[in-house]
């Protein structure tokens, strides 16, 4: 490992700088079922991923450096589309019996793969005396990253491992806000609505460009100290007072025409912020490099915690996929784990964070020279890292993949005026509960 880290760090210092990146674009096996064994000879493992452009280049460099230091393991990277396309591809290949060794996936997707009995539990690898993680290592990884990779419907086993992590943040054109009489990023939702009104009144432009997204809705609910799922009853909580308050805020913004929505799946809100068409957007912190690039110094950009009901006790949502390992052979499974472990080392996760805009998975990464230099380059580079202690993961239970689609449909009905906030949350709660119950019975 030491040889790998030295090789990787020197390679990155020589080949790349610290700025720029590409756009982000049945039950598992029981403990003891798979033993960690040394790979015999050379083992090639395949990872299906969704990284493009510079991010893909960085991932390839990390994989090549790992193989140079651990020559008995070759990592083959295969771009397989966006998250949804990868999910559909995996589900189709489960039926065909042709899966890679590893795949990038959100927790809701991993639950579906595990139901098909194709996912390897990582608990034995984590605890392995030769290739596992020490108690110090585990304590160093942000707790939310580990919690979200343990699945309650599968005896709380670790069925995936953190990969690309980020949190929901607010991006502001401070020149526009200042011109509208707003001195700092809104800290509460009341201030947020008031800022949107002020921008409209002073500049004649909507203050907020909304991108329809389930995780953003969940983050807004979290910020009001609400929850979206009750594990005891296996029910969604989208008809809660906190959820209703979120949908009412969205309803108000659109009724007053002080916000607008962009095409689903697009980055039009990012472009509109950069071009001065709107003053604020809510996006994953992984969007920061693209916003920063598109703004190109034309105005003062700020990134802050999303508005809160209680700014003194903030909460945001944790974004980002993990990697799960499929059942193949003991040799290939261990080889996959060794790569995941190295990827999560302080040095490598620091390089990944500095080069891509994602967040490091270890707390100690903030002390590395790489991230110290990165944080000192621009003040906003550290904002998302500082918000990590307040980031809460989303549910990782059966049926949540469908629930996410229902949330986005409900949000769409409100922004288009087809339903009131009250009607939307009532229908959403009922449909989400049905989806969760049906998923458990299947």
Image (cartoon, rainbow, N blue to C red):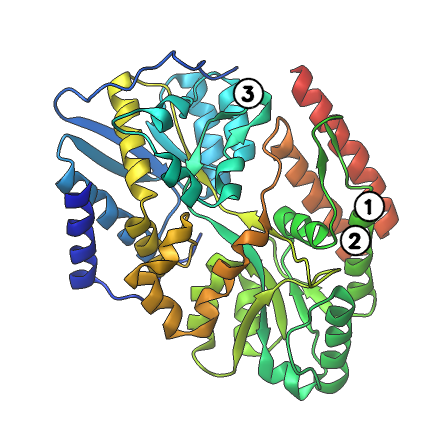
In the displayed structure image, the side of residue 423 where residue 100 appears, left or right: left
The vertical placement of 86 against 166, above or below, is above
Q: Which residue appears at 39% of the width and 35% of the height?
A: 135
Reading the image, the residue beneath label 3 is: 154
* Residue drawn 79% across the image and 68% down it: 190
Between 245 and 384, the residue placed more toward the observer is: 384
Q: Secondary structure at mark 3?
A: helix
Q: Are marks 1 and 3 in contact (CB under 8 Å)?
A: no
Q: Earlier in the sequence, mark 2 or mark 1?
A: 2
Disc 2 secondary structure class: helix
Which of pointers 1 and 3 lies earlier in the amino acid sequence? 3
Quadrant where the C terminus sits is: top right
User: What is the quadrant of the N terminus in the image?
Assistant: top left
Q: Earlier in the sequence, mark 2 or mark 3?
A: 3
Quickly name the residue at label 1.
Answer: 424
Residue depicted at x 38% and y 40% = 136
Is residue 20 visible to us here? no
The image shows residue 79 at horizontal and vertical percentages of 34, 42
Cα separation between marks 1 and 3: 32 Å
Of residues 434 and 156, the one nearer the viewer is 156
Residue picked out by circle 2: 247
- In the rendered structure, are the residues bearing label 2 and label 3 in contact, judged by CB atoms less than 8 Å apart? no
Distance Cα–Cα, label 2 vs label 1: 8 Å
Q: Are marks 2 and 1 in contact (CB under 8 Å)?
A: yes
Q: Position of residue 317 (x, y in %)?
A: 60, 50
Give the farthest residue toward the top: 33
Helix, strand or loop at disc 1? helix
Depth check, front residue: 200 or 311 = 311
């Amino acid at each position: 490992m030491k040889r790998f880290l030295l090789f990787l760090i020197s390679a990155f210092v020589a080949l790349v700088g610290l700025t720029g990146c590409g756009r982000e674009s049945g039950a598992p096996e029981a403990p003891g079922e798979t033993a960690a064994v040394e790979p015999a000879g050379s083992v090639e493992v395949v990872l299906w991923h969704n990284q493009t452009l510079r991010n893909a280049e960085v991932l390839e460099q990390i994989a090549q450096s790992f193989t140079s230091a651990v020559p008995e393991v070759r990592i083959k990277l295969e771009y397989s589309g966006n998250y949804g396309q990868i999910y559909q591809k995996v589900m189709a290949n489960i039926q065909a019996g042709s899966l890679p060794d590893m795949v990038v996936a959100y927790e809701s997707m991993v639950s579906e793969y595990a139901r098909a009995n194709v996912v390897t539990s990582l608990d034995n690898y984590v605890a392995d005396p030769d290739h596992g993680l020490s108690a110090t290592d585990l304590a160093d990884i942000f707790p939310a990253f580990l919690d979200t990779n343990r699945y309650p419907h599968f005896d709380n086993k670790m069925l995936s491992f953190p990969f690309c992590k980020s949190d929901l943040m607010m991006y502001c054109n401070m020149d526009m806000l200042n011109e509208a009489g707003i001195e700092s990023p809104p800290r509460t939702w009341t201030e947020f609505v008031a800022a949107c009104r002020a921008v409209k009144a002073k500049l004649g432009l909507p203050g907020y460009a909304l991108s329809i997204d389930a995780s953003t809705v969940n983050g807004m609910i979290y910020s009001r100290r609400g929850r979206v799922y009750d594990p005891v009853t296996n029910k969604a909580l989208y008809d809660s007072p906190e959820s209703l308050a979120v949908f009412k805020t969205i309803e108000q913004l659109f009724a007053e025409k002080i916000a607008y929505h962009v095409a689903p799946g697009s980055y039009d809100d990012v472009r509109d912020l950069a071009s001065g068409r709107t003053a604020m957007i809510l996006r994953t912190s992984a969007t920061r490099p693209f916003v920063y690039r598109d703004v190109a110094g034309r105005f003062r950009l700020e990134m802050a915690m999303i508005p809160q009901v209680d700014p003194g006790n903030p909460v945001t949502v944790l974004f980002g996929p993990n990697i799960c390992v499929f059942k193949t052979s003991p040799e290939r499974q261990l080889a996959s784990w060794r790569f995941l472990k190295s990827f999560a080392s302080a040095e490598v996760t620091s390089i990944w964070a500095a080069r891509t805009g994602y967040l490091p998975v270890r707390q100690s990464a903030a002390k590395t020279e790489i991230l110290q230099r990165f944080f000192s380059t621009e003040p906003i580079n550290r904002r998302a890292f500082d918000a990590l202690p307040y980031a809460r993961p989303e549910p990782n239970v059966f049926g949540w993949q469908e629930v996410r689609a229902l949330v986005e449909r409900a949000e769409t009905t409100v922004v288009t005026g087809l339903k009131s906030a009250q009607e939307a949350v009532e229908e959403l709660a009922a449909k989400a509960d049905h989806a969760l119950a049906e998923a458990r019975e299947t």
